[in-house]
Amino acid sequence: MSSPSKRREMDLMKLMMSDYKVEMMNDGMQEFFVDFHGPNESLYQGGVWRIRVELPDAYPYKSPSIGFVNKLYHPNVDEMSGSVCLDVINQTWSPMFDLVNVFEVFLPQLLLYPNPSDPLNGEAAALMMRDRPAYEQKVKEYCQKYAKPEDINASPEDKSSDEELSEDEYDSSDEQVVGKPDP
């Protein structure tokens, strides 16, 4: 076994032993999901995000690819793709770092200290700089809507709201009632 694959295995085991829920995507150890809890004392506290992690063949010499699966309102996270703008992952990665660093240091720091001057979500960055209370309210709304712990395993397609139902699906005619009426 080559050194990068041993390191990948070791880092993954270390992450699993650090009480993170890790779900493998296939038989290999290169793609997996990690459940990440918003840091305490932050706007994201109480939220849970599913993070998609992809380890390149050259890991740990090349950084992992990290993305939020469920939506997050943050200047440095692309709202649609979940991509993360974080220098330590994208540019200054070092083999000294491991997966536990990503989830215990880098992502919490990102959520605690957003950088609106280097945005992936321009709307969030502009709102944060222009109207901080409105920005904070929108972050909390996203947490309530997209990051509830009980919803973490539901795929986005599973989540529907009354607004998404067509008239056919919402038909409540008496013909569909099954069973006998109460005496």
Image (cartoon, helix red, strand yellow):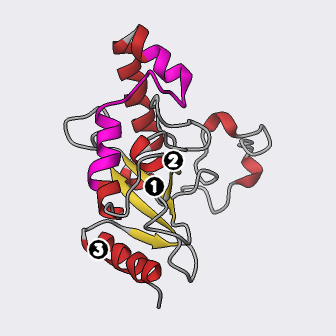
Q: Disc 2 and disc 1: Cα gap in Å?
A: 6 Å
Mark 1 Cα shell of 10 Å, populated few (<14), some (14-19), many (≥20): many
Most distant residue in the bottom direction: 1
Highlighted magenta segment, given as a residue range: 104-127
Residue under numbered circle 1: 50
Asked if the residue under mark 1 is in contact with the one under mark 2, i.e. CB atoms within 8 Å, the reply is yes
Asked if the residue under mark 2 is in contact with the one under mark 3, i.e. CB atoms within 8 Å, the reply is no
Please tell me which of labels 2 and 1 falls first in the chain: 1
**Seen in the image, is 133 located left or right of residue 159?**
left
Q: Residue at x 54, y 55 (%)?
A: 182
Q: Residue at x 48, y 47 (%)?
A: 90
Q: Which mark is residue 70?
A: 2
Mark 1 element type: strand
Mark 2 Cα shell of 10 Å, populated few (<14), some (14-19), many (≥20): many
In this view, 81 is above or below 180 = above
Depth check: give the residue in front, 40 or 178.
Answer: 40
Q: Which mark is residue 23?
A: none
Q: Amino acid at mark 1?
A: Arg
Q: Residue at x 45, y 21 (%)?
A: 117
**Residue 142: where, in percent of width, then height?**
45, 33
Q: Amino acid at mark 2?
A: Asn
Mark 3 element type: helix
Residue under numbered circle 3: 14
Mark 2 element type: loop
**Residue 128: where, in percent of width, then height?**
41, 17
Label count reads: 3
Mark 3 Cα shell of 10 Å, populated few (<14), some (14-19), many (≥20): some
Q: Disc 3 and disc 2: Cα gap in Å?
A: 24 Å
